[in-house]
């Protein structure tokens, strides 16, 4: 049974401002990603992987029906580890998030990301 679905669309050019400013990029990465995630970003195209991981996390929050500002969940509760291409990744969750998902009755999570030339679209679907 479907519990929730989240969809996020990010314009890649919007993120270029973050990458152009080393201090802004550093603060953004520190707030949103853990070290394992950053290490999984393809060094050839860090902006693409960073934007995709951010989009996946946004879609996840939407699938839960909450915003990161009011849910008690945090960016780093969701970990996106890429396995080569941007559309191949694994998700892992903090213990707090695992408990929250169990309390909601979530038993299965499906996630996907599609990167186009100017947009990244991510979906996360939660099932009971």
Image (cartoon, grey):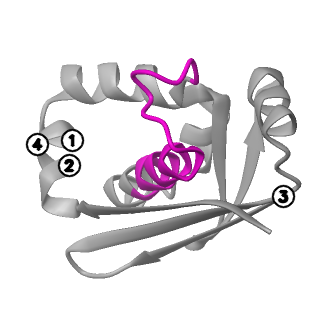
- Classed neighbour count for the residue bearing mark 4: other residues with Cα under 10 Å, few (<14), some (14–19), many (≥20): few
Kindly indicate whether the residue at mark 2 contacts the one at mark 4 (C-beta within 8 angstroms): yes
Kindly indicate whether the residue at mark 1 contacts the one at mark 2 (C-beta within 8 angstroms): yes
Residue carrying label 3: 128
Magenta region, residue range: 52-73
SS at circle 3: loop
Residue carrying label 2: 15
- Classed neighbour count for the residue bearing mark 3: other residues with Cα under 10 Å, few (<14), some (14–19), many (≥20): some
Residue carrying label 4: 17
Q: Give the alpha-carbon distance from disc 2 to disc 1, as whole Å.
A: 7 Å
- Across and down, in percent, residue 128 comes to 84, 58
Kindly indicate whether the residue at mark 1 contacts the one at mark 4 (C-beta within 8 angstroms): yes
- Classed neighbour count for the residue bearing mark 2: other residues with Cα under 10 Å, few (<14), some (14–19), many (≥20): some
Q: Along the line of sight, which residue is nearer the eye, 123 or 16?
A: 123
> In the rendered image, is residue 36 in sight?
yes
- Work out whether mark 2 precedes mark 3 in sequence or the reverse, and give the earlier one: 2
Q: Give the alpha-carbon distance from disc 4 to disc 1, as whole Å.
A: 6 Å
Q: Which mark is residue 19?
A: 1
- Work out whether mark 1 precedes mark 3 in sequence or the reverse, and give the earlier one: 1
Q: Seen in the image, is 36 located left or right of residue 112? A: right
SS at circle 1: helix
Q: Give the alpha-carbon distance from disc 2 to disc 3, as whole Å.
A: 34 Å
Give the quadrant of residue 19.
top left
Q: Seen in the image, is 103 located left or right of residue 26? A: right
Q: Seen in the image, is 117 located left or right of residue 113? A: left
């Amino acid at each position: 049974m479907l519990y929730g679905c989240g969809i996020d669309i990010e314009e890649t050019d919007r993120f270029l401002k973050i990458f152009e400013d080393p201090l802004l990029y550093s603060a953004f990465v520190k707030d949103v990603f853990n070290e394992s995630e950053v290490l999984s970003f393809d060094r050839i195209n860090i902006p693409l992987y960073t934007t995709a991981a951010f989009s996946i996390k946004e879609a996840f929050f939407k699938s839960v029906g909450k915003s990161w500002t009011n849910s008690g969940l945090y960016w780093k509760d969701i970990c996106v580890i890429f396995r080569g291409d941007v559309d191949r990744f694994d998700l892992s969750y903090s213990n707090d998030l695992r408990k929250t998902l169990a309390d909601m009755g979530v038993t299965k999570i499906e996630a996907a990301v599609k990167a186009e030339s100017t947009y990244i679209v991510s979906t996360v679907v939660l099932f009971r």
